[in-house]
Amino acid sequence: MTDRKEELAGNLAEVEQRITAACAAAGRARDEVTLIVVTKTYPASDVRALSELGVRHVAENRDQDAAPKAAACSDLPLSWHFVGQLQTNKVRSVVGYADVVQSVDRSRLVTALSKEAERAGREVGCLIQVALDAGEPSAGGGARGERGGVAPGGIAELADLVADAPGLRLDGLMTVAPLTGEYAGRQREAFDRLMDLSTDLRRTHPAANMVSAGMSADLEQAVAAGATHVRVGTAVLGVRPRLG
């Protein structure tokens, strides 16, 4: 085993212990929570090593980095999640490799994803990204938080659009713990709010039961709230190199 693979194995083991302990504390079974490793800025060799270590879900946030990496790792049994703000001109590329787009936050993006999923003959899972730092939506389709997302009041309309769109599957909700607004510094309360919104969504879309929340610093709070998926980067791969 290479030094890097040993490092990743040790980090993965520590994250696994954290998730297991968080599940136990919350009275949840360990298999109720899926680990997604965020591999942004790291090379395909790391993705390959993670796959060999048993990781099955990886996430990227920039298409220009993700597309060649996914191509280089196309032989691996991985599910690719796109978690960044997605511009419509990148949708065709992203649909080529992403199994799930976690950052759906506007109707125009739904239309573009549906068109490209149909063209590619693929079904793409979609999470509505919820901005818990946003105001209430306007008639234009939703006030967006500083890192993207639709305000809570805009979820139902966008979810219906996704559910009715050919080539798309409505999987649930995603959020990033907000840096501003009433939930700033209150991750557990933010994730509890997301779970309430998920309960509301499942009344009309029972299969949309995925809740993606929590990262390296706050995965315990997300598990305690009921998240089904946690997105962990730094705790597995190390501190990211500065870009540029």
Image (spheres, helix red, strand yellow):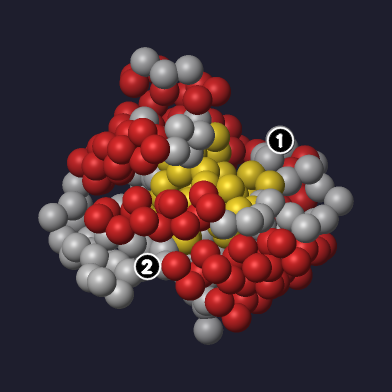
**In this view, 201 is above or below 40:** above
Q: Secondary structure at mark 1?
A: loop
Quadrant in the picture for residue 31: top right
Q: Amino acid at mark 1?
A: Gly
Q: Give me the residue at 58% from left, 71% from top.
A: 112
Q: Circles 1 and 2: CB distance less than 8 Å?
A: no
Q: Give me the residue at 18% from left, 65% from top.
A: 135
Q: Quadrant of the N terminus?
A: top right
The x, y position of residue 92, in whole percent, is 68, 72
Q: Residues within 10 Å of mark 2 (few under 14, many from 20)?
A: many
Q: Nearer the viewer, residue 86 or 68?
A: 86
Q: Which residue is mark 1?
A: 54
Viewer can see residue 7? no
- 14 lies left or right of 74: left
Numbered disc in front, either 1 or 2: 2
Q: Nearer the viewer, residue 189 or 39?
A: 189
Between discs 1 and 2, the one toward the N terminus: 1
Q: Give me the residue at 82% from left, 55% from top.
A: 74
The x, y position of residue 172, in whole percent, is 46, 44
The x, y position of residue 199, in whole percent, is 33, 34
**In this view, 179 is above or below 192:** below
Quadrant in the picture for residue 43: bottom right
Q: Residue furthest bottom?
A: 244
Q: Amino acid at mark 2?
A: Gly
Q: Residues within 10 Å of mark 1 (few under 14, many from 20)?
A: few
Q: Which mark is residue 148?
A: 2
Viewer can see residue 19? yes
